[in-house]
Amino acid sequence: MKRQILFLCSGNYYRSRFAEILFNHLAQENELAWRAQSRGIVAQWSRNPGSISPAALAGLRARNISPDVTRYPMQLTETDLTRAERIIAMYEAEHRPMLRAYFPQWENKTEFWRIPDLDEMNSENALARLEQNVRALTLALAPAKLFL
């Protein structure tokens, strides 16, 4: 059974979806015993016009990842949080207050990255920063290699 990482953002449409798909691609490539999922803290109230942000999709394709994106954004549940071994929210200033309001017992069990939404950072810079964070995470989770 693979260990679980949960990426969170507001609507599960842009940042968390990009992180999930990129992480799973890299985890498979590097044979990691981890799998990522993503959810939106307030996805049920978001008005996303489709299954995934065009910016996220373009960012993935630019990295030679062609995901089969069929599912729509998903609302975070208590079960999702319970199943995850690591929980990472995209932007502390935005997501800590949401967690405090809707899932207060999980606020201090969540790691926060500094990837703001499109109103504060363009997608090119945000996705580049997300990629750096996801790549660093996969390296940190990789089993140590023994050198003889």
Image: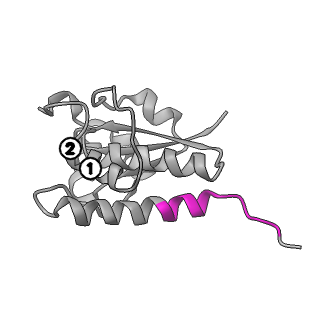
Q: Which residue is mark 2?
A: 54
Q: Position of 36 compared to 19: left or right?
A: right
Quadrant housing residue 70: top left
Taking the view exactly as shown, the residue that stands out farthest to the right is 148
Taking the view exactly as shown, the residue that stands out farthest to the bottom is 148
The kind of residue on which mark 1 rests is Ala
Q: Which residue is mark 1?
A: 58
Q: Is residue 121 above or below residue 24?
A: below
Seen at 39% across and 61% down, the residue is 131
Closest to the observer, 50 or 16: 50
Kindly tell me whether residue 35 is visible in this rendering: yes
Q: Which residues are magenta?
A: 135-146
Name the quarter where the C terminus is drawn: bottom right
Q: Residues within 10 Å of mark 2 (few under 14, many from 20)?
A: few
User: Residue 58: where, in percent of width, then height?
Assistant: 26, 49
Seen at 26% across and 62% down, the residue is 126
CB under 8 Å between discs 1 and 2: yes
User: Residue 3: where, in percent of width, then height?
Assistant: 61, 41
Quadrant housing residue 132: bottom left
Labelled disc at residue 138: none
Q: Position of 28 compared to 124: left or right?
A: right
Closest to the observer, 26 or 93: 26
